[in-house]
Amino acid sequence: MSVSANLSFRIAAVLIGGFVLLQLVVGTVMLLPSEVYERRASNLPPPDQVRAMAATLENIQPELRPAALAAFDDSLFQVRVVAELPSVEREQSGRLSEQRRAYLAALSDRPVLLWRDEAVIHRPLRDQPGPLNYIDPTQLAVGLSDGRWLLIDSRPSLLLQAFLRRRAFLSVAFGAVVLFALWLAVRQTTRPLVRLSRRIRTFAAELDAPDLPVTGAQELRELSAAFNDMKARIRGLMEERTRLLAAIAHDMRTYLTRLRLRTEFIDDESHRARAASDLAEMHDLLEDTLLFAQQASSTETKLSIIDLGEELARIVETRVEMGENVRLDPNEQDLVVRAAPLGLRRILANLIDNGLRYAHNVQLRAEQTTVGIVLIVEDDGPGVPPEAIATLGEPFNRIDPSRDRSTGGAGLGLAIVHALAERSHIGVRFENKVPTGFRVTLTFGLPDSPEAG
């Protein structure tokens, strides 16, 4: 599943995108021109204040000038007196020219210089009234009567710089906390959906699973309630189907018994044998169909601890006594599994019968692996077409298109295996064997308790 298809990612992207968009809108609004920026285009003091500074420095005693300069200092600019101006490249932009004319008007009897010695922002933005003009360091020099210069530097003070750095750090930390809170909120919101998806995936094998808790947001409560209703209806339909098939099977057995009795009155021996064979096939088909329906709709399976080695040995011994070519590879390991005893015997019987129907020999092998106990049932037959392997567990799916059960069966053998295995939580895999043959692999999970389930 791609990241973009994840619901949590999409919700988080919407929330974070909205948060970032809000910040961009606020930043854009702050950069728009306003009357405040028109009146004061930089961090420098206004012309009248500069004129008062120059007059004060000229009229006070020299020993009082350091105290006056300290008093003039502001959080946005620094004031000092220098004998010579620093030799730097002095750039005059459109906005600076307008500012210089304002200072010249207020300080008409003094020389005035205004420049930026380094550019922090691009010229088009510097020439527009706005807060970005407060970022560029601007210097103003006003000549004094003694030949020295009053130099005003618009660089923020160290205290203000420390405050701005601390504020930037707190903003980043707050943003990280907000993002983390958004992630937790999204995760908490989507958790019921994850739980619902897991229940849906296991619904086929867990018809008796408890209903979903109807909690959370209104939409999630409605979805959980709808799923619980759907599960109850499906369970009811499957139980009704089983009852219907059981009733049909009961009536059909009565008619089959009558037909068996009537075949005894057929004089022709070959006709009597064929009729008896047809009735036996009908009986087997009826029993298979009923068994499959019962297992597909069963909501409870009694699992027990089974010694798989002993069970396999007993089944193979019986088959060999019947003259069938069935072989079990010896294994000295302690192979204990958790399964339904009758269901396991029917699984093995169907797999062996299916193998003997298309092959001459059937071989069974069980072994302990890291994922559990694996039982392999394989034959030396022709195998099945590769495109048909995926549908082998479906009911009434026959590889042989004939209607003769002696060659193709009714298509329920492997479907019953699949249904019984699901009820006992046994993994099933169908595959062809190289170079020829067919293999069925059953994977049993390790029993977590010595008691029957």
Image (spheres, rainbow, N blue to C red):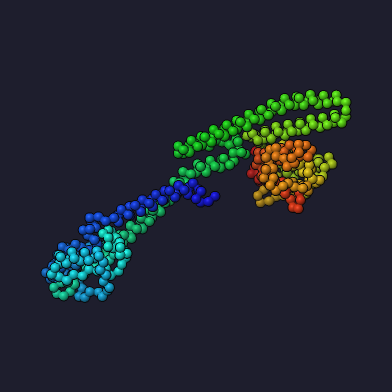
* 396 w.r.t. 51: above or below: above
Position of 48 compared to 365: left or right? left
Q: Is residue 110 visible?
A: yes
Residue at position x 79%, y 45% in the image? 359
Position of 87 compared to 12: left or right? left
Q: Residue furthest left?
A: 59
From the top left corner, tell me how far across and down residue 166 is, in percent: 33, 59
Position of 131 compared to 107: left or right? right
Q: Is residue 184 visible?
A: no
Question: Which residue occupies the foreground of this view, 209 or 334?
Answer: 209
Residue at position x 30%, y 53% in the image? 29
From the top left corner, tell me how far across and down residue 80 is, in percent: 21, 69
The quarter of the rendered structure image containing the C terminus is top right
Image quadrant assignment for residue 33: bottom left
Image quadrant assignment for residue 425: top right
Residue at position x 83%, y 31% in the image? 274
From the top left corner, tell me how far across and down residue 202 is, in percent: 59, 41
Position of 323 compared to 247: left or right? right
Question: Looking at the image, how many numbered discs can be counted on the residues?
Answer: 0
Question: Which residue occupies the foreground of this view, 403 or 41?
Answer: 403
Residue at position x 38%, y 50% in the image? 19
